[in-house]
Amino acid sequence: MGKKNIDWSSLGFGYMQTDKRYVSNYKDGAWDEGCLTEDATVAISECAGVLQYAQTCFEGLKAYTTEDGRTVCFRPDLNAQRMFDSAQRLEMPTFPVDRFVDAVVQTVKANIDYVPPYGSGASLYLRPYMFGSSAVIGVKPADEYQFRVFCTPVGPYFKGGAKPIVVKVSDFDRAAPHGTGHIKAGLNYAMSLHAIQTAHREGFAENIYLDPGTRTKIEETGGANIIFVDEDGNLVVPKSDSILPSITRRSLVDVAQTYLGLKVTEREVLLSEVENFKEMGLCGTAAVISPVGKINDHGKEICFSNGMEKMGPVMQKLYDTLTGIQMGRLEAPEGWIKVIE
Ligand SMILES: *Cc1c(COP(=O)(O)O)cnc(C)c1O
């Protein structure tokens, strides 16, 4: 045994089959005890609820090696709770929070040779998910479900430094008021594919979605929350019931307040006031923070003070502090780091 012979730093964000994955099945009103399997395929009814009516939700988190050589995950209990909430909204059975964390730990341990070494910038991406597996033809929840966790090594998100991106204000909507924007449902992504492909064809890296009700307020992008730095160097975070509660964003808010002494305001943010802000970042597990250089609002450009070459100073401080906590270079708040042992 020993680390796989993989060129960690040249990995992208793609799927590579690893040795083991965790599976648990829900039948007759209960989850079975679950186990690890080498079978990377799923066999389900041609009429499964997930295939007909998209009854599925997922999570995403990373395992990585810290400076002192431990293998850890970042706040997996919050992923567990979010998946619990997603399942409830989709009329799926909930998977217990402690069992979710245990399944993640088992999956990492069983694939420990795929956890990239410290300093490579790479990590082991974990994908817990759940879907309706039994046949459903009339519109209703399935009776049987499968919960799985697989993992795949992924490379550093930014190769050669985080360059600011250009984003567009989308003409499509992501999440209706009182809809499913606040849960991590596959259906939110299915309907975003046309919008993101359209943005890419036009030369933009991401879409900013506005609130569909008034189309005046900033919500988020397809897969990342948005944070701003105002003229006074403080953090402004858009608030809406249809924004997905990003664990990275919630952690950055804590870091801003307790490590950096910044003021954080979570409130509705109008598109029309964004030109007053100095910095903008997209936050999520994949990149932690992606700096934004410009917004294109139907031809009108809104430029941030960091320009197109580097992250702004406040985003950089937030990024360095949170990644420092994750990598064990800075002391973490109680409960943030789950050591795999
Ligand atoms: C997963 C996701 C995020 C990021 O959440 P993290 O917990 O920080 O990874 C943001 N927005 C959407 C729509 C998402 O699905």
Image (cartoon, rainbow, N blue to C red):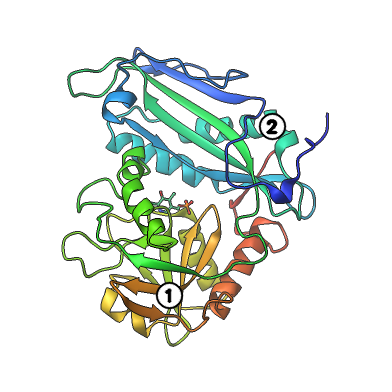
Kindly identify the residue that appears in the image at 55 percent across and 36 percent down.
101
Q: Secondary structure at mark 2?
A: helix
On the rendered structure, is 20 left or right of 228? right
Question: How many C-alpha atoms fall within 10 Å of the one at disc 2: few (<14), some, or many (≥20)?
Answer: some
Quadrant where the N terminus is found in the figure: top right
Q: Residue 305: horizontal and vertical position, in percent? A: 48, 84
Whether residue 341 is visible: no
- Residue 326 falls in image quadrant: bottom right
Mark 2 and mark 1 in contact? Answer it, CB < 8 Å. Answer: no
Q: Amino acid at mark 1?
A: Lys
Cα separation between marks 2 and 1: 42 Å
Q: Which residue is mark 1?
A: 294
Q: Amino acid at mark 2?
A: Lys
On the rendered structure, is 326 left or right of 8? left
- Residue 108 falls in image quadrant: top right
* 195 relative to 153, above or below: below
User: Residue 109 got which mark?
Assistant: 2
Kindly identify the residue that appears in the image at 68 percent across and 39 percent down.
340
* 228 relative to 55, above or below: below
Question: How many C-alpha atoms fall within 10 Å of the one at disc 1: few (<14), some, or many (≥20)?
Answer: many
Quadrant where the C terminus is found in the figure: top right
Whether residue 224 is visible: yes
On the rendered structure, is 209 left or right of 253? left
Kindly identify the residue that appears in the image at 74 percent across and 53 percent down.
120
